[in-house]
Amino acid sequence: MKLALLSDIHSNRQALDACMSHARAQGAERFAWLGDLVGYGADPGYVVRQAMALVAAGHCVIGGNHDALAVHPPKPGDRAASTVAAYGAQWTHEQLTPQERAFLAARPLVAEIGGVLLAHASADTPERWPYVDNETAAAQCLDAATRRPGICHVVCGHVHQQTLYQRGTWRGLVCFTPQPGVALPVPPPQQWVATIGSVGQPRDGDPRAMYALLDTDVWLLRFERVPYDHGAAAAAIRATGAMPDYFAQRLPLGR
């Protein structure tokens, strides 16, 4: 099975369409979206409707911290209202129908597909949204995941970076920065954690959208980069009149 793994779409219609088209062209048979469907970008309703259609067709969509913010945006004056993540949350909330907000609210924080645990942030206390951005956090994530029967692999989003952490026989973790389009062998029972990056807001200096493909027939994992019209996505953000211009400025920079 070729499983396309997408995360942190952030209401970026142009990036999502590019990644979905690319994945289908690579023969993807199943899709899993790992949360943060909304936030930052201009097209939350479009993205959520695509997610609803995927779930109706039997695919997997889990929730992220920005999705939770869109369902229950912080009120003006709340401490949480001053965070970067909260900017635009009220606007996003207002763009979504009650049915779309209910869909986001119903998303699980983790899911399992064929021995792979999927989480937006981490398998370790997923409700706290920790970042898997170093070997220690990756080890905690992997330890939490492998307590579940049959699980030895974890895929996460949240950090907007593409990284693979593999556990060796000495129990330590080796960290790899993958090259786009290069298939990496990840067979069971080897234990590993992959952070698959962001579809809608890459932050590694490369503006191309990120996602990954996992072929569970041969256990190969491929991290992908996909060009998209980030100029159109930035223009759409500015056209809302509600989002900080910084959200538009960062797209062509990949920051």
Image: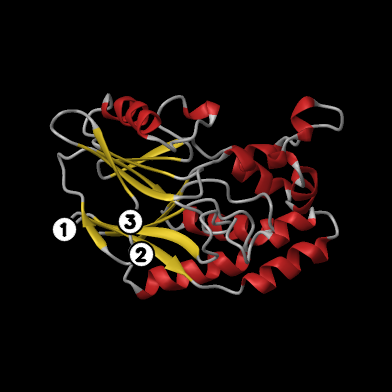
The answer to whether one can see residue 42 in this image is no
* Helix, strand or loop under label 2: loop
Q: Is residue 56 left or right of residue 246?
A: left
The reply to whether the C-beta atoms of the residues labelled 2 and 3 are less than 8 Å apart is yes
* Mark 2: amino acid: Pro
Label 2: which residue?
Answer: 180
Q: Secondary structure at mark 3?
A: loop
Residue 45, image x and y in percent?
68, 57
Q: Which residue is mark 3?
A: 178
In the rendered view, tell whether residue 85 sits above or below residue 26. Answer: above
Nearer to the camera, 233 or 161: 161
Left or right of 241, for residue 70? left
In front of the other: 53 or 206 = 206
For the C terminus, the image quarter is bottom right
Q: Three-letter amino acid code at disc 3?
A: Pro
| Proximity of marks 1 and 3: CB atoms separated by less than 8 Å | no
Residue at the spot 54% in from the left edge and 69% down from the top edge? 17
Pointer 3: residues within 10 angstroms few (<14), some, or many (20+)? some
Which color scheme did the rendering employ for the protein? secondary structure
> Which quarter of the rendered picture does the N terminus lie within?
bottom left
Task: Find residue 218 and name its label.
Answer: 1
Q: CA distance from mark 2 to mark 3?
A: 6 Å
CA–CA distance in space, label 1 to label 3? 18 Å
Return the disc, 1 or 3, that comes first in the chain's sequence.
Answer: 3
Number of other residues with Cα within 10 Å of mark 1, as a class: few under 14, some 14 to 19, many 20 or more: few
